[in-house]
């Protein structure tokens, strides 16, 4: 495929390993700006998780997801694309189509699916629109938000998005000019936590320098998907906008959102989505670090309970639900959960089987 170079040893696109760095604190950052954290995570659970939250609260949240992702992507790209480029786009002295081609190529390498422009109107008025198809989207509402946020940068105006399903894995997304409520503007924030040095040492590919464990995944750039070669699970490489989405949803749904999201993740994991064998410290630690979710510094687990501590934690609600679901699946029990996420990015989780003292999880 034109413009894509794969590492001859591990088979990972050079873009992935040159544009991102796996640090010893269990984090992934962009090479060009280390303030921007990234994660490499399974994505087939996203829409079921959102559906689970929707079921728990009894209200539709798809419009919130699209809005949150649109705003996050616009803010994220707005910080990456040079101001001079954005000004040239605004003044129509630079064609937006080649820029969009680059964004679509990057989206395929990150596992988002394959976007293709179908139709557009760009006359700088209220009748402007753009239509794209996306095949095999990693998440339908988030794909709508991705497209709307990107075209808000390219078109220089506020857009809304709607979609329709064409076939099982093919959707048509239309972005059109639409104003957004003034009270929502300026509220979205990307959280930057202080990064702690760690001692995670992932084995490296001798050719590209990326984690050798990435060779266990297969990139399919022509389709825009990444698959685990043994698990078959679909993966994406994504960034701080996902964390920002959780913050935006919490603003909309209130303080109950964290508990509902953890519960939805717990149910999904316990149903058997993940197949991590056992709860061994090194296995779990390396897998979390490979995903950029943080540095596991302490894990005590047996039938009486679990204590889990991770520094530089990221997407902490997903991690809490993951740990609880894995423990319950391993020991076939329901659990009491206690967790804390500190201002400096330290996540602590305590579990104890229901029917026994909660403190036994910490002293297990």
Image (cartoon, grey):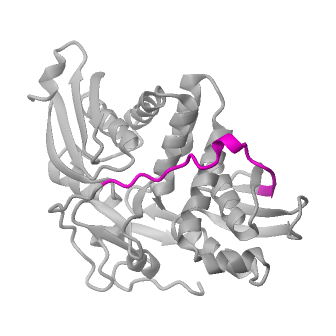
Q: Position of residue 254 (x, y in %)?
A: 52, 28
Q: Nearer the viewer, residue 153 or 17?
A: 153
* Residue at position x 16%, y 54% in the image: 282
Q: Quadrant of the C terminus?
A: top left
Magenta-span inclusion, residue 188? yes
Q: Residue at x 18, y 67 (%)?
A: 201
Considering every residue shown, the one lying at the far top of the view is 355
**Residue 288 at x, y = what percent?**
29, 54
User: What range of the chain is rendered magenta?
Assistant: 173-193
Q: Quadrant of the N terminus?
A: bottom right
Judge whether 138 appears above or below 205 on screen: above
* Quadrant hosting residue 72: bottom right
Residue at the spot x=35%, y=50% of the render? 314
- Return the x and y of residue 274 as percentages of the image width and height: 37, 45
Left or right: 179 as drawn, with respect to 48 = right
Note whether 121 is above or below 53 in the view shown.
below
Q: Is residue 185 magenta?
A: yes
Across and down, in percent, residue 206 comes to 25, 84
């Amino acid at each position: 495929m034109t413009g894509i170079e794969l590492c001859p040893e591990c088979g990972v696109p050079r873009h992935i390993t040159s544009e991102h760095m796996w640090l010893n604190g269990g984090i992934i950052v962009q090479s060009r700006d280390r303030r921007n954290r990234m994660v490499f995570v399974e994505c087939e659970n996203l829409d079921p998780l959102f559906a689970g939250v929707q079921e728990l609260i009894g209200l539709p949240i798809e419009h919130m997801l699209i809005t949150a992702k649109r705003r996050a992507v616009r803010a994220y790209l707005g910080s990456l694309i040079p101001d001079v480029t954005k000004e040239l786009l605004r003044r129509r002295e630079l064609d937006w189509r080649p820029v969009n081609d680059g964004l679509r190529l990057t989206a395929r390498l990150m596992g988002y699916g394959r976007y293709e422009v179908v139709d557009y109107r760009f006359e700088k008025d209220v009748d402007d629109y753009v239509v794209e198809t996306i095949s095999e989207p990693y998440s339908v509402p988030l794909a709508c938000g991705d497209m709307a946020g990107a075209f808000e940068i390219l078109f220089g105006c506020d857009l809304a998005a709607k979609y329709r399903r064409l076939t099982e894995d093919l959707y048509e997304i239309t972005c059109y000019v639409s104003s957004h409520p003034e009270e929502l503007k300026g509220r979205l924030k990307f959280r930057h936590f202080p990064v702690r040095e760690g001692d995670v040492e992932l084995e490296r590919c001798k050719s590209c320098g990326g984690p050798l464990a990435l060779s266990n995944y297969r990139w399919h750039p022509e389709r825009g998907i990444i698959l685990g070669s043994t698990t078959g699970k679909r993966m994406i490489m994504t960034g701080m906008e996902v964390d920002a989405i959780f913050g935006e949803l919490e603003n909309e749904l209130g303080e109950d959102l964290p508990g509902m999201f953890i519960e939805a993740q717990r149910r999904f994991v316990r149903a058997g989505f993940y197949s991590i064998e056992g709860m061994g410290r090194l296995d779990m630690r390396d897998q979390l670090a490979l995903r950029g979710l943080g540095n596991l510094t302490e894990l005590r687990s047996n039938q009486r309970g679990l204590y889990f501590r991770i520094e530089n934690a990221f997407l902490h609600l997903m991690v809490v639900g993951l740990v609880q679901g894995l423990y319950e699946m391993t020991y076939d029990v329901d659990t009491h959960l206690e967790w804390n996420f500190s201002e400096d990015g330290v996540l602590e989780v305590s579990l104890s089987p229901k029917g026994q003292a909660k403190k036994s999880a910490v002293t297990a």
